[in-house]
Image (spheres, helix red, strand yellow):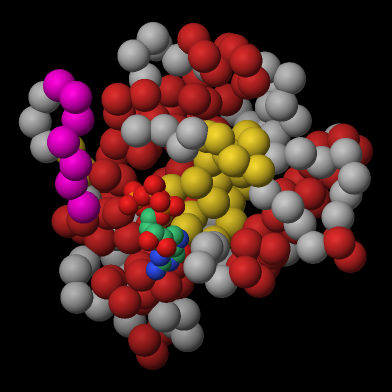
Amino acid sequence: MSDMYSESSECQTPLTKYQLISINSKGLPDGFKWLEMFEDVRVVVFCIALSDYDQEWVPCIGPLQNKMLASRDLFEKVVRHPCFVDTPFVLLLNKFDAFEDKINQVPITVCDWFCDFSPLKPHHNSQSLAHQAYYYVAVKFKELFSSITGRKLYVWQARARERTSVDEAFKYIREVLKWDEENIENLYGITADDSFYSTEMSSSPYIRQE
Ligand SMILES: Nc1nc2c(ncn2[C@@H]2O[C@H](COP(=O)(O)OP(=O)(O)OP(=O)(O)O)[C@@H](O)[C@H]2O)c(=O)[nH]1
């Protein structure tokens, strides 16, 4: 499936065109050959629902699979595709509102990949549990991306049911495109997103130290 996103007129960049591709497990029969059609894209925006960490789905072949793990595996395949060797990636971690509602009922450690999440106690940290978990998940994806590409993954949080959240996400994507064009390294290292955590797993405050 594909669709177009149109931005409000005051912030529109005339030459920016976004193509939405919705993928499910049945849509990948040819080993991702169709991704070659997108080799000239300037940025890959990969969207994952944060609230999927306790959800399961039935793949074409094989047993039930955790949705977050399925999204991670798909993300990894796209990242490894030769067409995107030099393409910047933005990971949109969506459904933050549903994540906030769920996380106090269902710990994110139910997802195997997140088994070492260790939130700080409220008197040690002013961040909510959902925010700590969001930064933890962002680090997991950043580490994965960096281990494959040696490059930086840009991560943004979204609540796609809110128009302003979608507009902010696209504003961020335009910034990434601008930084990429200007080839300015480490500029994002001083902004709020990164200020809460390091991309080094060993120094992340939300990972249980053995
Ligand atoms: N609470 C919440 N719901 C959302 C958000 N973004 C999308 N949804 C809802 O999630 C449902 C599925 O959205 P789709 O855009 O169809 O996503 P999909 O990948 O095809 O489907 P899912 O795998 O079920 O998420 C719709 O009911 C959306 O309204 C969000 O940020 N928060």
Q: Position of residue 41 (x, y in %)?
A: 71, 26
**Extreme-left residue of the structure:** 63
Q: Quadrant of residue 10?
A: bottom right
x 27%, y 72%: residue: 102
Is residue 9 in view?
yes
| Above or below, comparing residue 194 to residue 72 in the picture | below
| Magenta-drawn stretch, dominant element (helix, strand or loop) | loop
Q: Position of residue 40 (x, y in %)?
A: 73, 20
The segment highlighted magenta reads 55-61
* Residue 24 belongs to magenta span: no
x 59%, y 12%: residue: 36
Q: Quadrant of residue 60?
A: top left
**Extreme-bottom residue of the structure:** 123
In front: 27, or 204?
27
Instruction: Judge from the rendering whether residue 7 lies leftward or rightward of residue 92; answer left or right.
Output: right
Q: Position of residue 106 (x, y in %)?
A: 19, 69
Q: Position of residue 121 (x, y in %)?
A: 33, 82
x 36%, y 39%: residue: 71
Is residue 153 in view?
no
Q: Quadrant of residue 189?
A: bottom right
x 19%, y 30%: residue: 59
Instruction: Judge from the rendering whether residue 150 lies leftward or rightward of residue 172; answer left or right.
Output: left
